[in-house]
């Protein structure tokens, strides 16, 4: 059970894990930093407490701790209770959500083989460097029955604070891993029976519904960065190029929206 400790001094060293979250070169969740995972808000903190990520501590106003209820029984860590103003002094900005939790990243991280094992539908991303787009893709993947997310070249860190927040904490439950070689490691999917489908508006692509009607047993849906989309190398490495049919004059969608449509069209039936 979390031990609740009241703290009024923003300079207390016990709060250092939460300090200066708005200062870019000191962000503890940045790649190359201390490797922390930071959850904001009651819903996301609940998902962190229920995840495999080892929680270090919580910081928040008293009301938010009460909202967590029995979830606090899941961890034996300190929960620092403070005022909204003291919390703002620590993190560097006013936090409307009123509570934070900090966790370490699992060691070792998941591998591509871990994510592939037992999967039926995978999302494969290339160049998705925008943290909000990445978080939205994870949220859509969780909602629409995607079994895992594999990251190719140019993708941002799913455990960056903004991605975790936008995903509503679903990056903490959807398995993900990063390819070591791109796009060469796509062959690992093909060896495991996946049909690799690249989403692109190119004229030589086929309708996404054609892929659905062929009902491949296993499918990996590749999506690229918003704007440029997938590289030619990634499309060439796929088994099929597919598009979402759109009226004349419209040739693109937000990548998270495109992902949601593709996930819905290709997922197995959900009960």
Image: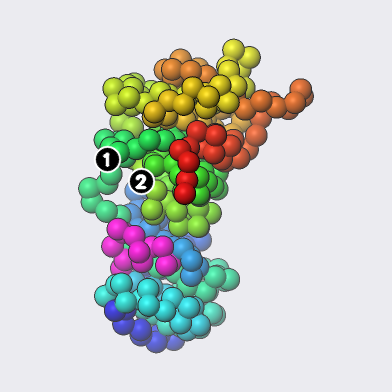
What residue sits 58% from the left and 71% below the top? 96
User: Circles 1 and 2: CB distance less than 8 Å?
Assistant: yes
Q: Is residue 171 visible?
A: yes
Q: Is residue 97 above or below residue 135?
A: below
Give the camera-side residue of 142 and 201: 142
Callout 1: helix, strand or loop?
helix
Residue lying at the far front in this picture: please name it: 271
Q: Position of residue 143 (x, y in %)?
A: 50, 49
Callout 2: helix, strand or loop?
loop
Q: Is residue 131 visible?
A: no
Residue stretch in magenta: 45-56
| Residue corresponding to mark 1 | 114
Q: Looking at the rendered structure, which numbered label has been put on residue 175? A: 2
Q: Is residue 120 above or below residue 43?
A: above
Q: CA distance from mark 1 to mark 2?
A: 8 Å
Residue 194 included in the magenta stretch of the image? no
Q: Position of residue 38 (x, y in %)?
A: 41, 61
Residue lying at the far top in this picture: please name it: 204
Quadrant where the N terminus lies?
bottom left
């Amino acid at each position: 059970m979390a031990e609740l400790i009241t703290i009024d001094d923003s300079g207390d060293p016990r709060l250092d894990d939460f300090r200066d979250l708005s200062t870019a070169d000191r962000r503890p969740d940045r790649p190359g930093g201390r490797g922390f995972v930071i959850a904001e808000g009651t819903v996301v903190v609940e998902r962190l407490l229920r995840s495999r990520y080892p929680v270090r501590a919580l910081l928040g106003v008293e009301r938010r701790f009460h909202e967590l209820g029995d979830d606090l029984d899941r961890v034996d860590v300190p929960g620092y209770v403070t005022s909204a103003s003291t919390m703002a002094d620590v993190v560097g900005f006013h936090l409307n959500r009123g509570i934070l939790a900090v966790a370490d990243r699992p060691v070792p991280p998941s591998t591509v083989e871990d994510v592939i094992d037992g999967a039926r539908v995978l999302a494969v991303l290339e160049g998705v460097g925008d943290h909000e787009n990445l978080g939205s893709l994870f949220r859509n993947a969780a909602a629409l029955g995607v079994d895992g997310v594999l990251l190719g070249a140019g993708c941002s860190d799913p455990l960056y604070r903004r991605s975790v927040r936008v995903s509503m904490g679903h990056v903490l439950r959807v398995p993900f891993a990063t390819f070591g070689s791109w796009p060469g490691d796509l062959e690992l999917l093909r060896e495991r029976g996946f049909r690799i489908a690249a989403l692109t508006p190119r004229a030589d692509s086929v309708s996404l519904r054609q892929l659905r009607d062929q009902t491949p047993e296993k499918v990996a849906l590749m999506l690229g960065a918003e704007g440029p989309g997938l590289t030619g190398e990634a499309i060439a490495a796929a088994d099929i190029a597919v598009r979402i049919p759109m009226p004349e004059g419209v040739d693109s969608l937000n990548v998270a929206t495109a992902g949601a449509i593709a996930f819905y069209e290709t997922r197995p039936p959900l009960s």
